[in-house]
Amino acid sequence: MTRRFIRDNAFLFAAVLLPVVVIGLFLVVTVIPQWTVPAPRYDVLLQTTEYHQAGGRVSIELLVRDERLHATIRGTGQNLYAPRVRLWRFDHTTLNVQEIPLDLPEDPPAGEGSQTMMIDALRDQRIVTDTRAPDGYEARTRTRGGPGLIGDIFGMRRYDEALVLANRGRTLPIKAPSRNVYEAPVFLGWLIDDRR
C-alpha cells in the first residue's frame, strides 16, 4: 500500500523533495570552502572617510609609495570642510579591525603647497598594493542592492558596499566602524612580513 501511494503521488513527492535537495546542495557548496580553504595569512590596511560638522583644516590623502604608507597633507582653504580620514588594520588572526592612529599635523603646510610624510606607526612595515595577496586571498568590493522593484517604486532604493576577502569560494567580510555607513572601507594594501 505504501509503494502504491508513493507511485500514485510521485509528482507530489518530486515537487517537495527537489527544492529540498537543491537547497541542501547549495548549502553544501557554500559551506565546504569555509572548511577547506585556509584562513588568510596577511593583515590588510584599510581607509575610511567620515564627514563631520567640525571639519578639518587639512585634507589628507593616504598612498603607498615604495611599499611604505605615506600621507599627503594639503590645506582646505576657507569655508571648505575636509572629511576625516581614518586608518584601519584588519588582523588576519582575530578577523577584527583595529584603528591605527595617524598622528599627523592639524595645521596646513606653509604656503599653498602640500606636504608628504611617512606614517610612523607603519614605518617598518612592507605594504603590497596588489589586490591579490601571496596566499591567494583577493580584496573585492561587493555591492548589494536594495529592496527590489517595489522599493525602487516607493523611493526605498539603497545600495550597500562591503569590502570582502575572497579565496576559492571562501569570503570574509571586513567591517570597519565608520559613521558614514554608505561607504565601504577602501583597500590600501597587504602588510607583508618578510620573516615568514
Image (cartoon, helix red, strand yellow):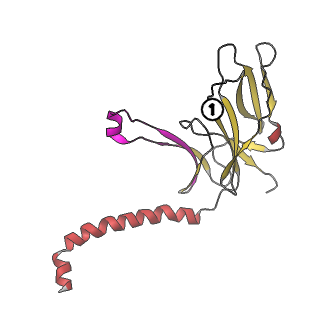
How many numbered badges does the structure rendering display?
Answer: 1
- Residue 193's place in the image compared with 19, above or below, is above
Depth check: give the residue in front, 118 or 109: 109
Residue 68 magenta: no
Q: Residue at x 20, y 70 (%)?
A: 11
Residue 86 x %, y %: 69, 36
Q: Which residue is mark 1?
A: 50
Q: Quadrant of the C terminus?
A: bottom right
Q: Is residue 12 left or right of residue 33?
A: left
Depth check: give the residue in front, 95 or 138: 95
Q: Residue at x 64, y 59 (%)?
A: 39
Q: Residue at x 35, y 35 (%)?
A: 152
Residue 153 x %, y %: 32, 34
Residue 164 magenta: yes
Secondary structure state at the residue bearing disc 1: strand
User: Residue 93: which quarter of the image?
Assistant: bottom right
Residue 44 x %, y %: 68, 47
The magenta region covers 142-167
User: Residue 26: which quarter of the image?
Assistant: bottom left
